[in-house]
Image (spheres, rainbow, N blue to C red):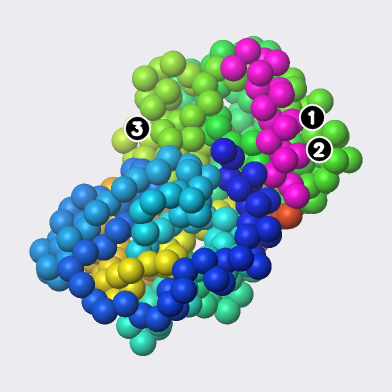
């Protein structure tokens, strides 16, 4: 199930959510266990191990490969997670549906390490339910040993000569947003008319794509299976860190940022342990350890001071722009079915 389609169902859950878990708003007694549900390839195991060693709290760390998987399990799964990691607009939908607990900032002193400019985004304007973890863009990465042309935007990569040499993240809303950028349509103006406008452009693109991969799009580039892609900024950052032949650019037609956040579901059992973990991961040295392993833009300024000059100059981690000037996805009710339908139909038609 795509994350956009799940977001569409959150409105219907709103009236029900406040009564789903009686007593969930009462802080649980602290215990020695934490059920953590987070993106794969995002938290070093050493961070988990050191937290357990320091606090005595056992961490049951489960990973997911997509936001839709996370949200579906939170809503319908048997596990009661204590900490989850939605992206921005999924968090917005969860907040609307009353699926998250308000945070107790008296237990989060290390929140002071987070730069104010990376707080109070539109998905959580009072910073009441979420904590920013990592921030990034979606852009173009290419192997400059193989691609000699000047790459600036989507028009440069979606060309017949690159057929079978392209990888993209497997995400319908992402691709719709790329088409919208090319057509000068707001990325959140998802409706039938605009989807129809985007469809023709996407159809041409999808005939050229070889690999769809949201989990690890860098792998196909590293293996030499493809030479160019549209990927998460953090994936491009790891490529550039390991080999400078991989170049990263934000599409000239337009780009957006995304924020992956921490949150506590309203049926969490170990709320005290959850706050301890969140405060721990905002500690400067811990956040820096995360950045070294997974080089997304870290909103923790205390951690940034511990990074090297080369790490801070990684163009995919810290683009030379005001990242907050970029657009951000919003929860658009009813948009999921539209983006899912056009994306799935075109993908099937292209043989994927």
Q: Secondary structure at mark 3?
A: loop
- Residue at numbered disc 1: 199
Is 156 placed above or below 123 here? Answer: above
**Label 2 crowd bin: few (<14), some (14–19), many (20+), radius 10 Å:** many
**Dot 1 and dot 2 residues touching (CB under 8 Å):** yes
Q: Which mark is on residue 17? A: none
Is 193 placed above or below 48 here? Answer: above
Is 188 placed above or below 113 here? Answer: above
Q: Which mark is on residue 195? A: 2
Disc on the earlier residue, 3 or 1: 1
User: Which residue is depicted at the point 31% across and 48% down?
Assistant: 62
Q: Is residue 236 in sight in this rendering?
A: yes
Q: Magenta stretch?
A: 334-352
Residue 287 versus residue 21: which sits nearer the camera? 21
Q: Could you tell me how far apart the alpha carbons at marks 3 and 2 are, in whole angstroms?
A: 38 Å
- Residue at numbered disc 3: 243
């Amino acid at each position: 199930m795509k994350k956009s389609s799940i977001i569409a169902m959150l409105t219907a859950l709103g009236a029900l959510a406040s009564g789903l878990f009686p007593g969930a708003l009462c802080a649980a007694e602290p215990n020695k266990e934490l059920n953590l549900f987070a993106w794969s390839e995002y938290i070093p195991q050493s961070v988990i191990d050191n937290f357990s060693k320091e606090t005595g709290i056992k961490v049951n760390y489960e990973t997911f490969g997509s936001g839709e998987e996370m949200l579906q399990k939170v809503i319908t799964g048997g596990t009661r997670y204590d900490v989850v990691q939605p992206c921005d607009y999924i968090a917005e939908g969860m907040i609307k549906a009353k699926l998250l607990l308000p945070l107790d900032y008296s237990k989060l002193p290390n929140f002071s390490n987070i730069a104010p400019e990376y707080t109070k985004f539109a998905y959580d304007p009072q910073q009441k339910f979420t904590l920013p973890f990592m921030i990034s863009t979606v852009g173009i990465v290419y192997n400059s040993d193989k691609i000699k042309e000047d790459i600036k935007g989507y028009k440069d990569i979606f060309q017949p000569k690159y057929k079978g040499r392209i990888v993209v993240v497997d995400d319908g809303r992402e691709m719709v947003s790329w088409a919208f950028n090319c057509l000068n349509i707001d990325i959140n103006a998802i409706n039938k008319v605009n989807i129809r406008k985007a469809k023709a452009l996407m159809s041409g693109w999808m005939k050229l794509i070889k690999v769809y991969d949201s989990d690890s799009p860098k792998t196909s580039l590293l293996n030499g299976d493809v030479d160019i892609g549209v990927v998460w900024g953090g994936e491009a950052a790891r490529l550039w860190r390991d080999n400078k032949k991989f170049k990263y650019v934000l599409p000239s037609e337009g780009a957006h940022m995304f924020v992956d956040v921490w949150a506590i579901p309203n049926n969490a059992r170990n709320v005290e342990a959850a706050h301890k973990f969140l405060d721990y991961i905002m500690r400067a040295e811990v956040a820096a350890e995360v950045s070294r392993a997974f080089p997304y833009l870290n909103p923790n300024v205390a951690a940034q001071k511990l990074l090297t000059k080369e790490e801070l100059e990684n163009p995919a981690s810290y683009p030379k722009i005001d990242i907050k000037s970029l657009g951000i996805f919003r929860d658009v009710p009813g948009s999921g079915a539209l983006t899912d339908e056009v994306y799935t139909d075109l993908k099937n038609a292209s043989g994927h």
